[in-house]
Image: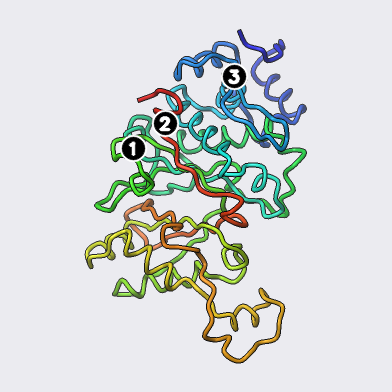
Amino acid sequence: MLRAEKMEVKDGLAAIEHFFQKGWTDGLPIVPPTEERIYEMLQSVNMEPDTIVGAIPERGRVFTAEIVAINAVMAGCLPGYFPVVMASVQAICEPEFGLHGPSASTHGAAIMIAVNGPIVEQIGLNSGANAFGPGNRANATIGRAIRLLMINAGGSPEFDRSTLGTSAKYSFCFAEKKTDWTPLHVQRGFKENDSTVTVFACEGPNQIQNHGSLNSVGILRTMSDRMSALGTMNMASETEMAVVLCPEHYHHLQKEGWSKESVQQFLYENAKRSIRDMKHGGIIDAPIDEGDEYKFKHAIPSPEQILLMVAGGEAGRFSACMPGWFSYKQSKAVTKSIKAATGFT
């Protein structure tokens, strides 16, 4: 039995306007969450409405399966997408993700959802052209469901203090493209045929273009420079970073013998700034001392803390990095098995 308050409205448009007036949307129209639609979502994961899925203890907020289903319906999800939504909710509610911090910060972090495994093809997630952009229902609505959940049940209207925010807070979900490299979820301890979600609190995509280099090192140096921009939290603190290579950059690197792990190692070693640069750029408020040019701050604490993936269209040499939120001691990327979270295979 559903616990949400029932209401009667004239028609679908009246329902949409009512939700706008109540502040229950992200500013865009929603799909009215009828009882039938809610139950279709719940049946896709065989969960009772009152099943507790996750919580934000600092806010006294609890997410039940019913609440998650309502917001997935509103976002426009099909029932087949719901296992990904549920696994994502469980992942962001893990203590190491630290959901309260990035969702209340003035930094305005988005919640990135990267999907791996057979479910990508089963529900038609996009890992190709415009992977971060509009046009794919699964990508758009899965990410949107998480944002609507935060607005309607996670306390975002009260706690979200983003200075600027980012359009990635509307929705930021994509799939990693299959390549000859080790997939992200396998690097993080899962089997290749496992379907998983990896969630990460981060900035929106920072594009990295390199059309000119004829060698891999040149491409990677461009990426390293972008990753170590002085204005990111990665240079001000110690946090993870996501990096998504476009297919053209990936093919160039792969043909020259680079593995995902060797790319991570290079980026870790070269995405850095000298203490002199940081003082000169105002990140460290102190006089420049002799020898500062030989002391360095890395953008990422270790190679393994670079979430390296491949996605995007086959044409164009535009990759991207997503700097992390504040500190990995307060928020880490979390990978969750969709089967373990929902029983869905």
**Whole-percent x, y for residue 19 in the image:** 71, 25
Q: Can residue 203 be seen in this view?
A: no
**Label 3 vs 1, first from the N-terminus:** 3
Task: Name the kind of residue labelled 1 in the image.
Answer: Gly
Looking at the image, which is closer to me, 251 or 83?
83
Are the residues at dot 1 and dot 2 in contact (C-beta closer than 8 Å)?
yes
Q: Is residue 272 visible?
A: yes
Which residue carries the number 1 mark? 117
Q: What residue does disc 2 label?
A: 338
Question: What type is the residue that disc 3 sits on?
Answer: Glu
| Label 1, label 2: how far apart the Cα atoms are | 10 Å
> How many neighbours does mark 2 have within 10 angstroms: few (below 14), some (14-19), or many (20 or more)?
many
The residue pinned by badge 3 equals: 66
Instruction: Judge from the rendering whether residue 86 lies leftward or rightward of residue 260; answer left or right.
Output: right
Label 3 to label 1, Cα distance in Å? 26 Å
Which x, y percent locates residue 290?
61, 92
In what quadrant of the picture does the N terminus appear? top right
